[in-house]
Image: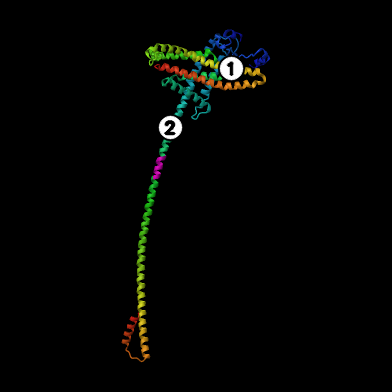
Amino acid sequence: MAETTATGAGMPQLDVSTFSNQIFWLIVTLVALYFIMSRVALPRIAAVLADRRGTITSDIAAAEEYKLKAREAEEAYTKALAEARAEANRIVEAARAEMQAELDVQLQKADAEISAKAAESERRIREIRDSALEMVSDVSNDITADILGVFDAKADKASVVAAVSERMKGGA
Amino acid sequence: MRNKGTETVASESSGFEIKPMDQFEVKALFGGDVSWYTPTNVTLWMALTVLAASALMIFGARGRALVPSRAQSAAELAYGFVHNMVRDVAGHDAVRFFPHIFTLFMFVLFANLLGLIPFAFTTTSHIAVTAVLAFTVFLSVTALGFILNGAKFLGLFWVSSAPLALRPVLALIELISYFARPISHSIRLAGAMMAGHAVAKVFAGFAGALGAAFFVPVLAVTALYALELLVAVIQAYVFTILTCVYLRDALHPSH
């Protein structure tokens, strides 16, 4: 204490007697620290940093590759989907055409049957009507002949028939 | 400090007995006189500086993990910080001096930070230490400038962009400022460290002397410590970046 006050006016920093000691130990320290840092610490950290940079770069490359693959897969998927859809459309179209053809055939057949049946019915109706008319004229003739018999009027069969049919035409 | 504190209270009427400069005394560790090779508190705290720096840079980064731990992150941060500083300030060709500059940075940083521990000895508060650092930088950078550029290194002082008549005057000014570099370089660091520690000690002494109102200086010391932490880091940064600036001048002397 007393000697520092004497030598350095209260500032140990100005005590020249300790300079050699400080300088000596500082040089020892700096050399030691330099070798520790430059030989051990810094190469290690540089290696770690380089390693990390490499890993990050390769990871990014791998991610890029995966992304590319995913895009390819997506494209393939979309393509397959479009193909499948076209195929489905084609099948639906074909089925519809087939069904349409079948339907047409059936319809035609049904039409033909219906028209045949209609023709048949018509024919029978005409027959029935014809026979009915015949029966009406027969009945009329008979009735006319009977009436004439009641009134004792002489008329041959042919003239009666002619007269009745004449009347019936006019009445109709 | 503690037993001195009671003394201080006892002798309060006769004035404070705060001795803020005691902490800077160089003492032999095992007693006796201080000769150039005696292990002193300088030796102890410089050794601790080396240990702390190595602990962070080697032990902290021992995992060499891809995803770093906290300590490894800090070590990588220090590495990246100084590496970028050297590259950005001094240029790409200065990166080969990165280990030297990193050593300087770590030494100053850890000496400053360890000095903040109460009862610690701050090696960087001594002008002898910072002057050796600064003159080492100055001499190596100057020698490097002449080795790499030869006489062209003197172009640093010959401002070719100035009018011819002004150049000799500027050369004189440049020369003076060049030789003032190591002085400002060393005194800035030692001064900042010494002043902060002395002030902290004065406030701490007040805490002992004020009795019941002790909390006022304690709060002040707390605030001062935050500031000193900042100063410790900034001074290490300033010392390193100035070294990079000087190195750039040596590598690229043309203005």
Mark 2 belongs to which subunit? A
Residue in the foreground of this view, choosing between A127 and B154: B154
The image quadrant where one finds the C terminus of chain B is top left
- Binning the other alpha carbons within 10 Å of mark 2 as few (below 14), some (14 to 19) or many (20 upward) gives few
Distance CA(mark 2)–CA(mark 1): 54 Å
Q: Residue A58 carries which label?
A: 2
Percent across and percent down for residue A165 are: 33, 83
Residue that label 1 marks: B199
| A75, above or below B124, in the image | below
Q: Residues within 10 Å of mark 1 (few under 14, many from 20)?
A: some
Q: Can residue A78 be seen in this view?
A: yes
Residue B150 picture quarter: top left
Q: Which residue is drawn at 37% across and 50% down?
A: A87
The magenta span reads A70-78
Tell me the residue at 49%/21% (across/down). A40
Residue A104 among magenta residues? no
Residue A44: x percent and y percent?
A: 48, 24
| Residue at x 37%, y 82% (from the top left corner) | A136
* Image-based side of A3 in relation to A27, left or right: right
Closer to the camera: disc 2 or disc 1?
Answer: 1
* Secondary structure of residue under mark 1: helix
B231 shown above or below A52 = above
Q: Which chain carries label 1?
A: B
Q: Front-most of B67 and B227?
A: B227
The label number, if any, that marks residue A100 in the structure image: none
Q: Which amino acid does label 1 sit on?
A: Val
- Count up the numbered dots: 2
B211 to A99, vertically: above or below: above
**Disc 2, SS:** helix
- Where residue B96 sits: x, y (%)? 43, 20
The secondary structure that most of the magenta stretch takes on is helix
Q: What is the three-letter code of the residue carrying label 2?
A: Ser
